[in-house]
Image (tube, rainbow, N blue to C red):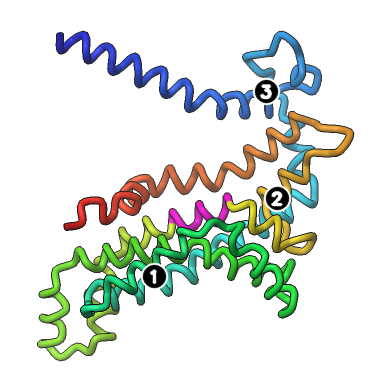
Amino acid sequence: MIRKRSITAWVVLALFLVWSLFPIYWLLSTSFKAPNQVSQVPPVWVPSLDVSAYTTALADPTIQTSLWHSAVVAFGATAIALACGVLAGYALGQLATRSTDRYEFWVLTSRMAPPVAVALPLYLMFRSTGLQDTLLGLTLAHVLLVIGITTWILVETMRGLPRELLESALMDGCSYTSAFRRILLPLTIPGIAGAGSIAFLLSWNEFFLSLILSDIDATTAPLALYQFVGFQTLDLGQLAAASCAVLVPTALVVLFFQKHLVTGLTMGAVKG
């Protein structure tokens, strides 16, 4: 009976992997197909490893600029969110008061409203202040998108550290700032890495706010892929190649920060 259950579990897992990974395989195979193979019926399952789609798509100035814009916005939003989240985590996680829970809930509410609820107010404010269609304005908008979950993760990270560490540092003559910088901050590096990875992924893949708040000068990679689809023509091979290029940073973050991502996503799951 146990053996049958094991075989069934492996079969289900294999089917789930095929179902999950097949779209990625099809995207990669399409990007490496020759132009005459992309729309061929029946489809070509094994591509000819033609890189012409990559050379053409990546030579497009719009794709190059949008990738740079996405990197600037994602790194900027992640850095700002982490700086605010670490300080908020220290205050709410280690310097707790009776009203801490209210502040934590208020921080998390920034993730409860869908982006469409704040898109119009942001657009009107950014247009009146000259931030519309700028990398600075888009970065600030992405900060609003990621700062809630970043702060929540870092609050739980700080709370997981023994309170005795802070008390011992204060008794040894450290100030609150010095204790945070010398004792607590180095111990929260894994949590910071997890929160930063999640913030980067959310910002890099964000589409709706970029569509509303940018036009020409601040086009990001997801928006460039959307605009890559022409009205009369559509080159699926080049679109697949550009999509693979956009997926590379996401894949690298997941590959190198997988452990920290799992830690960040499960932070607070067993909170008492």
> Can residue 201 be found in the magenta stretch?
yes
Quick check: 139 above or below 173?
Answer: above
**Amino acid type of disc 3?**
Leu
Relative to 60, is 240 on the left or the right? left
- The quadrant of the image that shows the N terminus is top left
In primary-sequence order, the first of circles 3 and 2 is: 3
Q: Quadrant of the C terminus?
A: bottom left
Q: Write the residue at 56% across / 63% down.
A: 142
3 or 2: mark nearer the eye? 2
Residue 200 colored in magenta in the image: yes
Residue 206 on image: x %, y %: 59, 53
Left of 84 or right of it: where is 4? left
Which residue is under mark 2?
223
Q: Relative to residue 11, is residue 31 depicted above or below?
A: below
Residue 177 is situated, as x and y percent measured from the top left of the image, at 28, 85
> Please, what secondary structure does the residue beneath circle 1 have?
helix
The residue indicated by pointer 1 is 106
The quadrant where residue 148 appears: bottom left
Measure how far apart labels 3 and 1 are at the Cα level. 51 Å
Residue placed furthest toward the right? 232
Marker disc for residue 49: 3
Q: Nearer the viewer, residue 62 or 7?
A: 7
Instruction: Name the mark nearer the viewer: 2 or 1.
Output: 1
C-alpha separation, residue under disc 3 versus residue under disc 2: 27 Å
- Residue at 65% across, 71% down: 137
- Compared to residue 78, the image places residue 181 above or below, namely below
Amino acid carrying label 2: it is Leu
x, y percent for residue 55: 76, 37
Q: Residues within 10 Å of mark 3 (few under 14, many from 20)?
A: few
Residue at the location (55% across, 48% down)?
Answer: 249
User: In this picture, which residue range is highlighted in magenta?
Assistant: 197-205
Q: Which residue is depicted at the point 61% across and 57% down?
A: 116
